Image (cartoon, helix red, strand yellow):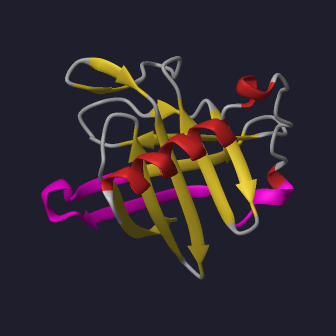
Amino acid sequence: MGTRRCALLVAALLVIAAPGTRGQSATPLNPADAKFFLGVWVIEMTEPAVFKGTHTIRVWDNGGTVAASVQANPKFPAIEATGVYRDGNMLILTLSHHAKPHPMQENGMPIWAVVSAVVDGDTMKVALMLEQSQTIKRGAGNRQN
């Protein structure tokens, strides 16, 4: 995928996933509509090779709405998704500059991140897009019991 096309894809996902940009709020995702995403998923990021590593994605019922977090490094706390959306068989997580306990960072600066996840049987396939990056990180993993 070309650099320009990748940047446009990330920009489009950020616009779609940021309800404030359209002047309306998103409806919270009901856990019944996301039951096959619920759980703790350990994802082995494999592409590109330079970004290999383990990420943990947690998706849970938070009092009747779906909440999620992404932990890219076991040394640091998980970052809570500021947006959780479902589009068909894809779960989309956004992590804004306002994510708790802190936003994702690149070179010490807060960045947006978008995670797309598709569950295929017992496997979750993930693509991670970062605001300042031209690279889409990819990986897959299984739900933990």
Viewer-side residue, 4 vs 121 = 4
The quadrant of the rendering that contains the N terminus is: bottom left
Q: Is residue 37 at least partly visible in the picture? A: no
Query: Which residue is found at the position 19% from the left and 54% from the top?
Result: 51
Query: Which residue is found at the position 50% from the left and 20% from the top?
Result: 100
The furthest residue to the left = 50
User: Is residue 92 found inside the magenta-colored segment of the image?
Assistant: no
Answer left or right for 55 relative to 26.
left
Residue 136 placed where, x, y %? 35, 55
The furthest residue to the bottom = 121
Viewer-side residue, 140 vs 6 = 6
State the extent of the magenta-drawn residues as a range: 32-55
Query: Which residue is found at the position 54% from the left and 56% from the top?
Result: 116
Quarter of the image for residue 26 reads top right
Quarter of the image for residue 120 reads bottom right
Residue 9 placed where, x, y %? 50, 52
Answer left or right for 50 relative to 73.
left
Residue 30 placed where, x, y %? 85, 47
Residue 111 placed where, x, y %? 39, 26
User: Is residue 39 found inside the magenta-colored segment of the image?
Assistant: yes
